[in-house]
Image (cartoon, rainbow, N blue to C red):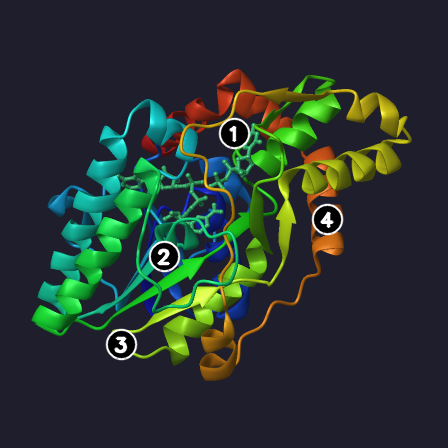
């Protein structure tokens, strides 16, 4: 199978490519990524020379970017993904998440290929109790969530109107290796290692439903192979936690691993002004994917958090190069090397 993976240099996309190359070593992977601030080719350094893996720098909003590329399915991870950035400036979110998805839908329509759209539980909005199912109404609250909901609506419209073979997955909050340090979990680990304040929005009691990234990658692969066209699948681990509990667990692990005083680390916690429109609770019901596809999470939260803390401790250079901005130069340096050959 030949897969066009968009956004493969980001957090989940790079984990997905690594997973696919080990689960299906015969697959051809084309990674189409614009390399925005969130795209980091160093995430794929260990596999960039594998013969059936090819990186193409390109924008999903640009029709030309897929010209000449051959593939059987598109897995669309490419997006602007950070809620705080969408509050500061939503324009790139509308462009990439809506117009970019539209462009890929047109490509899928022209080529009659499978289109798997990677979406989020944030499209359902916030709920104080109960769980969102695939039939829950879409009530996005942040500009990010609204742009993802818009793209989901377009996918639905293309299925209904043009009968394209598309599926949507809506996953809960991911964590694990290679997550960009603006997101809660890597931010807490790195700030703890650097002894910097750990900003907690509001009262710290907002609830997120956390899933280990590899479990998400396996779920996307399962939907690609066993999912039905036109269907939506929620992906979640039934693992709701208030933010402050996650933060305390992380600080406890960092203290344990580095033999530090836990109290010194919890002293870094700093309650700050709440995020505008901060969703109180996300919680999804993953029963459909469990029953119909036979997928279930393998990683417990305790173990996943331990692995993640260990990864950030062992990969200091990776995140230091992000914080210094050095990582942005990696692609250009590689590219220049290739031109010389
Ligand atoms: P990320 O921000 O780490 O990576 C996004 C990638 O997309 C980057 O490599 C970036 O360079 C690329 N990109 C951005 N705009 C592009 C464009 N116009 N053309 C080509 N490439 C472009 O994001 P992530 O956390 O890996 O999320 C991946 C997908 O999963 C997104 O669609 C997101 O909405 C969805 N999702 C994320 C989570 C989560 O917890 N992180 C949860 C559910 C769903
Ligand atoms: P985040 O990782 O940005 O994911 P999302 O907003 O998509 O759920 O944030 C997870 C939760 O952590 C969310 O409730 C906001 C909160 N948060 C903080 O309290 N402090 C921070 O510095 C960040 C980045 C997030």
Question: Helix, strand or loop at disc 4?
Answer: helix
Q: Of residues 142 and 73, which is closer to you in this image? A: 142
Q: CA distance from mark 3 to mark 1?
A: 34 Å
Q: Earlier in the sequence, mark 1 or mark 4?
A: 1
Front of the two marks 4 and 3: 3
* Residue highlighted by disc 2: 118
Above/below status of 228 relative to 148? below
Q: Residue 200 vs residue 75: left or right?
A: right
**Residue at disc 1, CB closer than 8 Å to ligand 2:** yes
Q: Residue 256 vs residue 108: left or right?
A: right
View extreme (front): residue = 128
Q: CA distance from mark 2 to mark 1?
A: 20 Å
Residue lying at 34% horizontally and 31% vertically, measured from the top left: 86
Q: Earlier in the sequence, mark 2 or mark 1?
A: 2
Q: CA distance from mark 1 to mark 4?
A: 19 Å
Residue lying at 48% horizontally and 56% vertically, measured from the top left: 16
Q: Of residues 196 and 104, which is closer to you in this image? A: 196
- Badge 1 crowding class, 10 Å Cα cut-off, few under 14, some 14 to 19, many 20 or more, is few
In the rendered image, which quarter is residue 323 located in? top right
* Residue highlighted by disc 1: 182
Q: Residue 184 vs residue 49: left or right?
A: right
Question: Helix, strand or loop at disc 3?
Answer: loop
Task: Tell me if I can see residue 165 in this picture.
Answer: yes
Q: Earlier in the sequence, mark 4 or mark 3?
A: 3
Disc number placed over residue 307 in the picture, else none: 4
* Residue highlighted by disc 3: 229
């Amino acid at each position: 199978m030949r897969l066009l993976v968009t956004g493969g240099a980001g957090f989940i996309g790079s984990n997905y490519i690594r997973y696919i190359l080990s689960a299906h070593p015969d697959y051809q992977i084309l990674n189409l990524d614009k390399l925005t601030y969130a795209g980091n080719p160093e995430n794929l350094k260990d596999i960039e020379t594998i013969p059936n893996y090819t990186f193409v720098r390109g924008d999903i909003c640009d029709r030309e970017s897929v010209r000449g590329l051959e593939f059987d399915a598109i897995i669309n991870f490419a997006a602007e993904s950070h809620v705080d950035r969408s509050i500061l400036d939503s324009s790139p979110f509308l462009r990439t998440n809506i117009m970019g998805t539209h462009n890929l839908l047109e490509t899928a329509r022209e080529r009659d290929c499978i289109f798997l759209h990677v979406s989020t539980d944030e499209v359902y909005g916030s709920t104080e109790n109960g769980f969102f199912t695939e039939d829950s109404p879409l009530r996005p609250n942040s500009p990010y969530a609204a742009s993802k909901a818009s793209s989901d609506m377009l996918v639905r419209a293309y299925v209904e109107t043009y009968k394209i073979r598309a599926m949507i997955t809506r996953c809960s909050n991911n964590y694990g290796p290679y997550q960009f340090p603006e997101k809660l979990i890597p931010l807490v680990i790195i700030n703890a290692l650097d002894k910097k304040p750990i900003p907690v929005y509001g009262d710290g009691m907002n609830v997120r439903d956390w899933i280990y990234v590899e479990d998400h990658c396996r779920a996307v692969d399962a939907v690609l192979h066993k999912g039905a066209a036109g269907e939506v699948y929620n992906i979640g681990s039934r693992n709701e936690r208030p933010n402050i509990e996650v933060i305390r667990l992380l600080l406890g692990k960092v203290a344990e691993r580095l033999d530090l005083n836990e109290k010194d680390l919890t002293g870094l916690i700093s309650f700050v002004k709440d995020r505008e429109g901060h969703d109180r609770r996300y919680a999804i019901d993953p029963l459909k994917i469990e029953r119909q596809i036979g997928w279930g999470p393998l990683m417990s939260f305790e173990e996943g958090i331990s692995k993640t803390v260990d990864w950030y401790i062992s990969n200091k250079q990776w995140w230091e190069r992000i914080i210094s901005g050095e990582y942005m130069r990696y692609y250009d340096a590689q590219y220049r090397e290739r031109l010389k050959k």
